[in-house]
Image: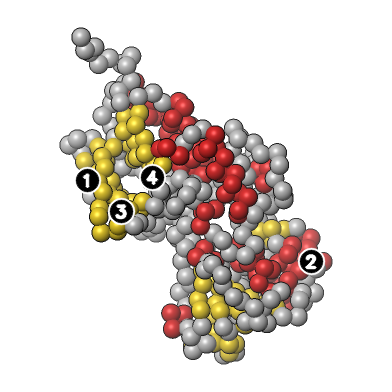
Amino acid sequence: MELSATAFVPKPIRIVAIGAGISGIQFLKDATTRLPNISITVYDKNSQEGGTWAENRYPGCACDIPSHAYQYSWNPNPRWSRLYAEAAEILEYLKSPVTNFNLRRYIQFSTTCTGANWDENNSEWNVTLQRNETPNDEISVKCDVFIIAIGRLNNWKLPAIEGLDTFQGRVIHTANWPQGLDHHGKDIAVIGNVASSTQCLPGLHKDARSIGNFVRGPTWLVPHVHMIKKIGDPQALKALVPIDYKAGCRRFTPADKYIEALNTSNVELISTQIKQVEGNAIITTDDQRRTYDIIVCGTGFEPYAPRFPIKGRGTANLSDLWTMNGGYESYLAATVAGFPNSFVFNPPICPVNGSAYPGIERTSDYVIRVIDRLQKDRLRSVCVKQSAPRRFQPLGSITHARDGLGRTLLIMV
């Protein structure tokens, strides 16, 4: 005889998550160990887990957070080989919990999400996907809960420089590094002076004929004492040392090898802004013309723009909301108004300084507890109110933080 549905019997929940990086692995481990009566599938566009650490392979690619802080609290690694672990070692670390907790059986690799739409009548998400090998064949799956765990560091962007697309040499973004690139004896332009470019440049300059490092503005490099003691050129020091903001307002960039490379004879630091690219040359606003074989862009990512259309209740479209005009809203850095039964890792108004892991763990715990209520209370859907993100939003502003936190001691890990 079939039992009647009661609040004591958690209802079955179908979960689809996009992304098998740090966030996706954390959520998958939590969901499979803490939630009963679920079916869950994680889809990832790459051929393996690891997210950004499976993708980035530029010379010197490494973490910019000390290794002992850049790990799951439940999966400590006491054997990191370096203070700032390199990409290959981090990738192996991320593979370990997937293997140890037998999580790979829930992941479908080489599958790209192309869209997600909320069906109000049936209280479910319709998710469309494509297999990388057969991109013309679209797959459609339905789920009760949709998890966005695609991360912030995979949608790389090239700088908006006039003529860059007509450069006669080779243009490379650090996040799309070609295997087997021969840079020996080449003249190379490196654009940028944050994490990827400061890591990449030291790995290139020893074999390059020359490197021109184009920097848009200063940034805090650590150990910061090296900035004062080891940069011999006063103009370079002026271009690199921030005076408009204090240390900690932006992420610190570990850069001892970068600072050493700046003092070598074949590296030129250029703080004059780029005007355009013409032929095989970069022209700066002072009309200086420098020719190169390769342009390397360490110019970061589009961190919040969705990689595929995500349409929620009514006319809600995440691509419209996460713009300057849309307000970049989220609530508790986990949910977005207008998107029922959907949760997102690392949205706007999420922690960005320090290690990514603690915030991801807290977000996952929150999402698991909400899904638990969804099951036990046998709810059709749950959605944050429209007013909640706007009350939460000021917490992300500098003024509110300064006034509200007062003398609170904040510790970055």
Distance of label 3 from label 2 (alpha carbons)? 52 Å
Q: Could you tell me if residue 331 is visible in this image?
A: no
Distance of label 4 from label 2 (alpha carbons)? 49 Å
Which residue occupies the foreground of this view, 216 or 280?
280
Q: Is 136 left, or right, of 172 in this rendering?
A: left
Q: Residues within 10 Å of mark 2 (few under 14, many from 20)?
A: few
Q: Which residue is mark 1?
A: 314
Which quadrant of the rendered structure holds the N terminus?
top left
As displayed, is residue 390 above or below residue 159? above
- State the residue at coordinates (76%, 65%): 227
Which residue occupies the foreground of this view, 253 or 155?
155
Q: Looking at the rendered structure, which numbered label has been put on residue 108?
A: 4
Q: Nearer the viewer, mark 4 or mark 2?
A: 4
Amino acid type of disc 4? Gln
Q: Position of residue 104 (x, y in %)?
A: 45, 39
- State the residue at coordinates (49%, 40%): 25
Q: Which residue is mark 2?
A: 228
Q: Which colour style is shown?
A: secondary structure
Distance of label 4 from label 3 (alpha carbons)? 11 Å
| Badge 1 or badge 2: first in the primary sequence | 2
Q: Position of residue 122 (x, y in %)?
A: 19, 35
- State the residue at coordinates (57%, 40%): 96
- State the residue at coordinates (80%, 74%): 232
Q: Nearer the viewer, mark 1 or mark 3?
A: 3
Q: Position of residue 112 (x, y in %)?
A: 35, 53
| Badge 4 or badge 3: first in the primary sequence | 4
Q: Which residue is mark 3?
A: 130
